[in-house]
């Protein structure tokens, strides 16, 4: 259920409008605060966010709409601390595993898929298969990179018939978070590149971890709790489902941001792990094609990227080409958990650090 703005004809900053909607907001999202001061702070953030939403949605030229959602009682910095990673260098850094496979341009997209393709719907892709699992929620944990990596591995498994993404719940992100920072406590034996739990990491490092440990397990067997319940798990040995083959992963980014190759890789390789800097209006997105405002997206070469997601489709709307991006903030955020981001101009770094899984191999038995 989403929050519906009422009394939109009232002036921005109207006390009655803000009071009424903040109470509705608290009731809808079951919000409570530990002190009166915290509630006042939350209401002030809500008021500012409401004004931003109303002002933006009045712009007839805007290509996208905003809304009030469960994050609307947070300031931008509070939201970043709750949902985003610590900024990572753009486009890459030494701590990022370099995918062995460099995507080779094939020029093989047929006419039927030149404008649009969607791996969520069997009839809208060349394999006639669903290769996207349901939208998930990372909770108050900067684990988006694990969800992004899992989504590209899930897509590959479903494209190759190992799973059916129309019903399968997907890979366990929790197993990666619990086990990825160490190997049964033997840190010196770790063979994969680092990542840092709820503080962030690179998707290719997660795929490399899954290759070395043969450790991908089903989420139903190892449920997600980080950032949701305050609980943490110790790494558990579980029956494994699949793992990446020896080529591990590939990228379109070795020659820089290239939207043409990203589009073709999405057609040929399926869902792609991407990274962006997200700020400003991004967290309040509702619908349309997101073209970042100047204040939403600073120079990513100096700020870096702070969020990882998954490209699962491309298309065109009102003359704008876009990537359809699967987020990990639950199905009530944005357009049922997705956002359309304008394609072709590397907005916020979206086309500059892209990874895909080469081939997932079926496995049985316990994690190594």
Image: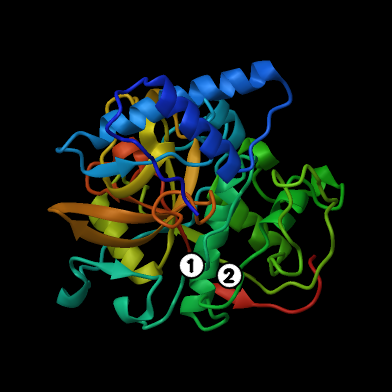
Q: Considering the image in quadrants, where does the C terminus appear?
A: bottom right
The reply to whether discs 2 and 1 touch (Cβ–Cβ < 8 Å) is yes
Q: Secondary structure at mark 2?
A: loop
Residue 60 vs 253, above or below: the answer is above
Q: CA distance from mark 2 to mark 1?
A: 7 Å
Q: Position of residue 132 (x, y in %)?
A: 47, 68
Toward the front, the furthest residue is 16
Q: Position of residue 365 (x, y in %)?
A: 79, 77
Q: Position of residue 211 (x, y in %)?
A: 64, 63
Toward the left, the furthest residue is 319
Classify 10 Å Cα crowding around label 1: few (below 14), some (14-19), many (20 and above).
Answer: many
- Residue at image position (15%, 75%) is 111
- Residue at image position (66%, 60%) is 210
Q: Quadrant of residue 64?
A: top left
Residue 75 vs 273, above or below: the answer is above
- Residue at image position (74%, 45%) is 181
- Judging depth in this view, the residue of 226 and 148 nearest the camera is 226
**Residue 94 seen in the figure:** no
- Residue at image position (84%, 59%) is 236
Residue 36 vs 263, above or below: the answer is above
- Judging depth in this view, the residue of 102 and 257 nearest the camera is 257
Disc 2 or 1, which lies upstream in sequence?
A: 2
Classify 10 Å Cα crowding around label 2: few (below 14), some (14-19), many (20 and above).
Answer: some
Mark 2 lies on residue: 245
Residue 259 falls left or right of residue 230: left
Q: Secondary structure at mark 1?
A: loop
**Residue 250 seen in the figure:** yes
Mark 1 lies on residue: 358
């Amino acid at each position: 259920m989403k929050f519906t703005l009422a009394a939109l004809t009232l002036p921005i900053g109207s006390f009655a409008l803000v009071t009424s909607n903040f109470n509705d907001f608290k009731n809808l999202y079951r919000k409570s605060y530990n002190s009166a001061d915290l509630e006042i702070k939350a209401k002030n953030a809500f008021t500012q966010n409401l004004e931003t939403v109303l002002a933006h949605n009045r712009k007839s030229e805007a290509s996208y709409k905003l809304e009030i959602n469960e994050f609307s009682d947070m300031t931008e910095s509070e939201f970043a601390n709750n949902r985003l990673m610590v900024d990572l260098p753009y486009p890459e850094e030494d701590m990022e595993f370099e995918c062995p496979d460099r995507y080779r341009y094939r020029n093989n997209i047929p006419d039927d898929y030149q404008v649009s393709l969607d791996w969520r719907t069997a009839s809208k892709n060349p394999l006639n298969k669903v290769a996207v699992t349901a939208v998930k929620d990372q909770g108050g944990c900067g684990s988006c990179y694990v969800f992004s990596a899992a989504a590209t591995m899930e897509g590959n498994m479903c494209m190759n018939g190992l799973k059916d993404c129309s019903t399968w719940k997907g890979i366990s992100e929790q197993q990666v978070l619990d086990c990825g920072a160490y190997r049964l406590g033997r840190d010196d034996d770790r063979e994969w590149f680092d990542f840092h739990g709820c503080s962030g990491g690179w998707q290719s490092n997660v795929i490399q971890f899954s290759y070395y440990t043969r450790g991908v397990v089903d989420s139903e067997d190892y449920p997600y709790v980080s950032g949701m319940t305050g609980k943490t798990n110790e790494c558990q040995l579980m029956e494994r489902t699949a793992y990446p083959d020896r080529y591990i992963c590939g990228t379109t980014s070795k020659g820089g941001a290239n939207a043409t190759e990203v589009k073709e890789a999405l057609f040929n390789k399926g869902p792609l792990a991407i990274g962006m800097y997200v700020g400003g209006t991004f967290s309040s997105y509702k619908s349309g094609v997101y073209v970042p405002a100047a204040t939403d997206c600073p120079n990513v070469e100096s700020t870096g990227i702070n969020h990882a997601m998954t490209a699962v489709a491309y298309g065109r709307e009102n003359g704008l080409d876009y990537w359809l991006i699967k987020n990990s903030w639950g199905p009530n955020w944005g357009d049922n958990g997705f956002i359309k981001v304008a394609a072709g101009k590397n907005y916020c770094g979206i086309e500059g650090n892209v990874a895909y899984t080469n081939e997932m191999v079926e496995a049985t038995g316990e994690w190594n």
